[in-house]
Amino acid sequence: MIIKVLGSGCASCYKLEENVRKALAEKGLEAEVVKVTEFRDILKYGVMKTPGLVIDEKLKVSGRVADVKEILQWIE
C-alpha cells in the first residue's frame, strides 16, 4: 500500500500525516507514506486545496484533515 499526503508542508499536512501513521500503527499495518509537495504533482490528482490524501492512487480526501477513524476505514 502506498499512501501519499499532498501538501506544501503546512500544519494541516503534518497533522494528516500524523493521523495516517496513527491509523497504520493501530491496525499493525505497514505502508509506504510519501509526502508530495510539488504543486504540479498535487494538481495531477485534481486537488485544489490541501491537504490531500491518496491511497493506492485513489484520492480519498482533500481540503481538510481526515481523522484516524476515517483513515482506518480506507485502509482496511
Image (spheres, helix red, strand yellow):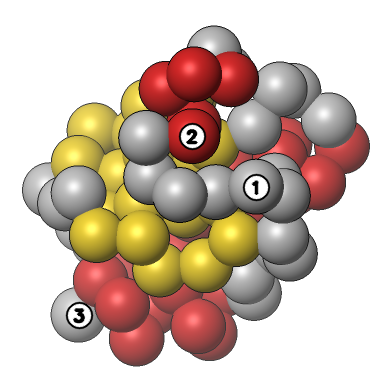
Residue 75 seen from this side: yes
Amino acid carrying label 2: it is Leu
Q: Is residue 37 above or below residue 27?
A: above
* Disc on res. 4: none
Which residue carries the number 2 mark?
A: 43
Q: Is residue 20 left or right of residue 74?
A: right
Cα gap from disc 1 to disc 2, whole angstroms: 7 Å
Residue at 52% of width from left, 67% of height from top? Answer: 61
Give the percent coordinates (x, y) of residue 46.
45, 49
Toward the top, the furthest residue is: 38
Q: To which quarter of the image does residue 6 belong?
A: top right
Is tag 3's residue or tag 1's residue first in the polypeptide sequence? 1
Residue 22 seen from this side: no
Give the percent coordinates (x, y) of residue 23.
44, 65
Callout 1–callout 2 Cβ contact below 8 Å: yes
Please rate how many residues cluster around mark 1, counting C-alpha atoms within 10 Å: few if below 14, some from 14 to 19, many from 20.
few
Q: Is residue 31 above or below residue 60?
A: above
Give the percent coordinates (x, y) of residue 44.
37, 35
Which residue carries the number 3 mark?
A: 76
Is tag 1's residue or tag 2's residue first in the polypeptide sequence? 2
Camera-nearest residue between 43 and 28 = 43
Which residue carries the number 1 mark?
A: 48
